[in-house]
Image (tube, rainbow, N blue to C red):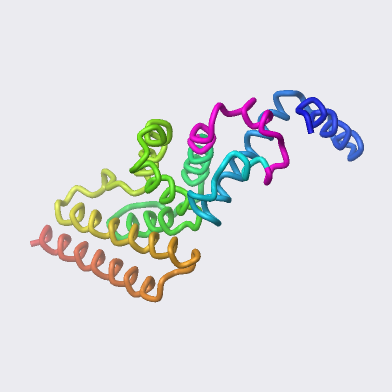
Amino acid sequence: MKPNAERALSSTRDRAAGCPRRTQSDRSAATRAALADAALDLLIEQGWAAVSAVEVCKRVEVTRGAFHHHYPNLPSLLADALRRLYAEMRRKDKPPVSDLTTLIDATWGAIGDPRFKAVLEAWLAMANDPSLRAEIGPVVAEFSALARPNKILTAAAHRAFYLLAREAMLGLALGRATNGGKPVAHEQAVLARLRAEALRIQRSTSASRDQ
């Protein structure tokens, strides 16, 4: 179907459904969002190798011409898709972070999100593709803000343990990614140990200050 025909069909459907007439800007934004969602779904469901402009267009039911009207190439679509995911994860309601334990919980809230697999897939793919790294590398780097020691970790022991915990949680996320999205058998045991050790370090630091 040609792009003009697609727009005409969309307008006809809107009128038939009694919807307000959408502007060209509205339709363009909706198409871009649909393409980005489809790219993320493919990354999460089937992995990097399955993501192509052809497959994305199939899911959204648009032509390649319509695709290239919105994005010059696949890496630019993936960068936009990841940026949208990052913005959504940043907006997600989170418990307040006040200490090492709550920071670990907040970090796992991001890394343990099933959609984080899209970030892992992009991260691994760009390692061996300089052109892809140039396009999506800056966006993937933004996700590090979701798993970065923040200003509340002033004690060296807290920061050191947080970095260790973060790497362990990334390992759990990779485990899920290679296990069909399901938690690995030892996931809860690892998380419980991380929380327990974080609490022990907090108490130890607090006791040292009180002396």
Taking the view exactly as shown, the residue that stands out farthest to the right is 16
Most foreground residue, 35 or 53: 53
Q: Position of residue 13 (x, y in %)?
A: 87, 37
Most foreground residue, 51 or 23: 51
- Residue 117, above or below 201: above
- Residue 151, above or below 201: above
Q: Position of residue 136 (x, y in %)?
A: 42, 36
Taking the view exactly as shown, the residue that stands out farthest to the left is 211
| Quadrant of the image occupied by residue 165 | bottom left
Q: Is residue 83 left or right of residue 189?
A: right
Q: Is residue 69 magenta?
A: yes
Residue range corresponding to the magenta coloring: 58-79
Quadrant where the N terminus sits is top right
> Which residue is at a point 59% across and 39% down the rendered structure image?
53
Q: Is residue 80 magenta?
A: no
Quadrant where the C terminus sits is bottom left
